[in-house]
Image (tube, coloured by chain):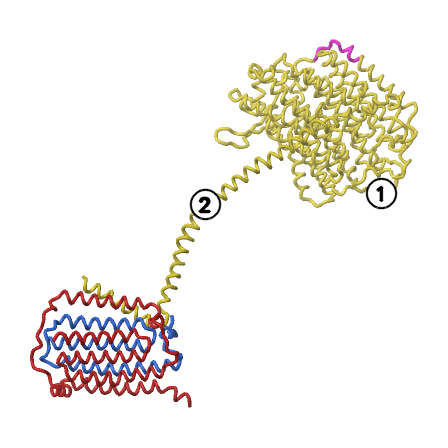
Amino acid sequence: MNIPLGDYLMLSAFLFAIGLCGALSRKNAIIVLMGIEIMFNAAILNLIVFWHYKYFATPTAYIFAIFAISIAAAESAVGLALVIAIYRQYKSVDVDEFTSLKG
Amino acid sequence: MEAIFWILSAITVLGALFAITLRNLIHCVLSLILFFLGIAGHYFLLRADFLGAVQILIYIGAVAVLMLFAIMLTRHVTGDEGPREVLGGKWWAGMGTAVIIAGLLWAIIRKDQLAQILPAGGAQTSVVEIGKALVADWVVPFEAMAVLLTAALIGAVVIALEEVIRRR
Amino acid sequence: MDHTEYLQHLAQQQWLIPFFPLVAAAIQSLMKRPSRKASGALTIIAMGLSCIFALRAFFATIGSGAEHHEVERTIFNFTWFKFGTTSLDLGFILDPLTAGMAAMVAFVGFWIFVNATGYMAEDENFTRFFCFLSLFAASMLGLVISNNLLLLFMCWELVGLCSYLLIGFWYFKPSAAAAMKKAFITTRIGDVGFLLGIVMLYWKTGTLTMYTHDALHPGALEQVGALALRNGWWGLSTASTIAFLLFIGAMGKSAQFPLHVWLPDAMEGPTPVSALIHAATMVAAGVFMVGRMYPLFTAEPGSWVLDFVMWIGCITAVFSATIAVAQFDIKRVLAYSTCSQLGFMVMGLGAGSLVAGQFHLLTHAFFKALLFLGSGCVIIGTHHEQDMRKMGGLRKYMPITFWCYLFGMLALSGVPPFAGFFSKDEILLSTFHRNKYAWGLATFAAFLTAFYMTRQMYMVFAGKWRGGENDHGHDKHGKHDDHGHGQHGGEPHEVTWNMWLPIAVLSLFAIGLGFFGHKYGEYLGVAGAESEEGMAVVMGASLAVVALGLLLGWAVYGRKTMEHATDEDPLSVALGGLFTFLNRKWYIDELYDVTIIRFTATCGVFFRLVDKLIIDGALHAIAWTAWGISQFFRWIGDEFFINGGFDAGCESVRWEGKEFSKLENGRIQNYFRVLSLGAAVLLLIYFFT
């Protein structure tokens, strides 16, 4: 395991960027949520990387990561429920059509 | 050993990329599953075994399935979203932003002494230790998590349930 | 107090003489329309008071000349207003010339006013008439007592104004309206010369006061000696130039040829007006003014000014006498006669004799006023008939009028011992000494005077009444104000007492005034009398022509009087075309119309064109320039700053607001994009600084 920390960090940054790009570019709401999930995972990966390289001693980051995953899961559940509810209202999941908060 | 890293990285990155650029939504989700798998692999590589298992269980087992269900429930278009339609209006803005952030971070990383190789040393953290930590040091967040999850469950059900109530 | 102090006291009170009529005029201008009794009484009383004061002044000055053989002039000057170091003075003078004239004006005026209450008895505008008459009397008296050319000129213009108002008293008659304009404009032409003379006098002497009795600041007439030595225009000395210019004013006011054209037309006014203004007083103002300024005329012995004056007078006398022969309107005959007699007066002054001219002025005032008032009585008595051909035989119907008129006629013709004989003779004598040709022409004019007056007497009073021949005796005087006796022609009748009393009084003077001729010379204090040589020739000649005139008049008109109103005048039968020429006033009016009036009208059109093109053009150019400038400033200020700056600023804020509101389009993904962009920028800032 002689992988430089920098490589891992670069990986995580890249994944985050991809996730961000997807969240900003796609017009389907579900893909946007997917992008958010990708971002989440990138962040948690980053956390574990640092835990691995520096803080083996305490499991604090590990616990943190477990919690983060749980929260991410809860968030995605609620988010998708919202998408379904919106779909019922607008009959579409195109984010460009959700303009009732305009102005 | 670095080869595993690079292979896993490739899987992860490709999975993420295809997740956001594929036309067919189901394909997107499947690519996302690939991504999750890659991440799990990275967790295993980083000696965070439990976390890797949790990752597979929760993300692939729950989140991805949930997404599939959501896709199936919100399908109204006749499938084909072309790449232009896929990426919506100012796709280049998003792309640009992402590139900026990536570049930045890359620059940071390259700059500092983070290029050094730190050995992965020390004892592994075992599941027993995690369990102990959860109920001893971190019991309050643990319980809060439980509450949160319950709330999320109820909330999701309530939000998704509206139509049924209205129909009656 | 002694005599000198008394005279000074009177001189200070000279202003009272015109004061009363002025007050009467002011009160009457505010009175209601036909307040006959009140207005008439007010006027008569005011004039009576004026007469008393004038007579008092007159009697005070009698004897002063005889004692000292030089004129005793008492003056009273006062400053009207000052501006800077110069001041405008006015002043009164009390000397024989003034006192005599004032007494005559007041006295004759008084009796004319009495007559006028009868003449205008049925007129609607009674009050207005007497208001104007009083104003006239006040201005004429003011003119007479004035020691200052400024005051004299102001009163001169005022009498001109009153003449204008009174000639056109019945302004709704177009002929009267035209006549009033003609009078004013013609006298105005003369006034141009007058004003030039006044200005030149002020320029050369530095003062307009005639006498100051102050060696340090001598009056204008006291500097005559110096003026006579300086050079003026046209080969004259300054004094003579000024005299000439002043005489032009007198020509206008006293109806000398060629500015005489207004006087006959002035007969459009009521007869008392004709009597007062156009016989006795206003027209005499020109003669009086020359007499007042006489030192200027005589300053330079060899100048041609006096000769010019004499010849103008002579020409006028003959010219108007010839016209009077061929007129049919009773007032026209008298008007031309007045013109002719004024010519005599002017001729007398021009011949070098102040006494002769002034004396004839005084006597003429009395008998001409008498004649005009008499004609007024005739007009009223014949129910507003003025054409002599329609009269006749009035001796039976109006005896008092007849006898008074006869005295006036004899006085005018120069029959001794009536007044006119003596005064006219003085003039003829002076002219004889001066220029024999002028004397010859003047004698011819005297002959004509006798002739046309005889003609008038026979046509009006002798023979049989021709007036009732056509029923509509007065359709030609359309809008004369209604008088009670209405439309029936009827026979003539004698007039009321307030009309024949004045003419009776005046006829006394016509008879008796002549005997005071010599006394008048002494009274005026003129040194030495005219030399008596040639007196026999002159007197003989004038008696002869008078007799000839009377005889011829009787021969043509008296032997066989006119039978019918439409009969041909015997003279016109005899003279034919010449008669028509004379009747049409030598076509002078037509000549003026074609030349001067047409020229003036053309000038008017030309100047109107100039006005439109040049002046209006200039105005338009200025207006356009102003508009252009304002547009420029509008462009700068308004367009550029306000519209461009402020408005554009506001507009751009609104536009930016609109653009920015596009950010908030309700699309969450958009918000997310912006968010990430912001995060990227923050990272940049954080990591690179």
Q: Quadrant of residue C444?
A: top right
Identify the subunit bearing mark 2.
Answer: C
Viewer-proximal residue among C192 and C392: C192
Give the chain ID for the blue colour. Answer: A
Figure quadrant of the C terminus of chain C: bottom left
Viewer-proximal residue among A3 and C509: A3
Q: Would you say residue C435 sits in the magenta stretch?
A: no
> For residue C84, which numbered disc appears in the image?
none
Give the chain ID for the yellow colour. Answer: C
Magenta segment, which residues? C530-539
- Relative to C343, is B66 on the left or the right? left
Viewer-proximal residue among B30 and C314: B30
Relative to C40, does residue C407 appear above or below in the rendering? above
Q: Would you say residue C534 sits in the magenta stretch?
A: yes
Give the chain ID for the red colour. Answer: B
- Relative to B155, is C598 on the left or the right? right
Farthest residue, direction bottom: B168
Q: Give coordinates of residue C583: x percent, y percent.
A: 81, 26
Q: Write down the residue under mark 1.
A: C486
Q: Quadrant of residue C605?
A: top right
Q: Write down the residue under mark 2.
A: C632
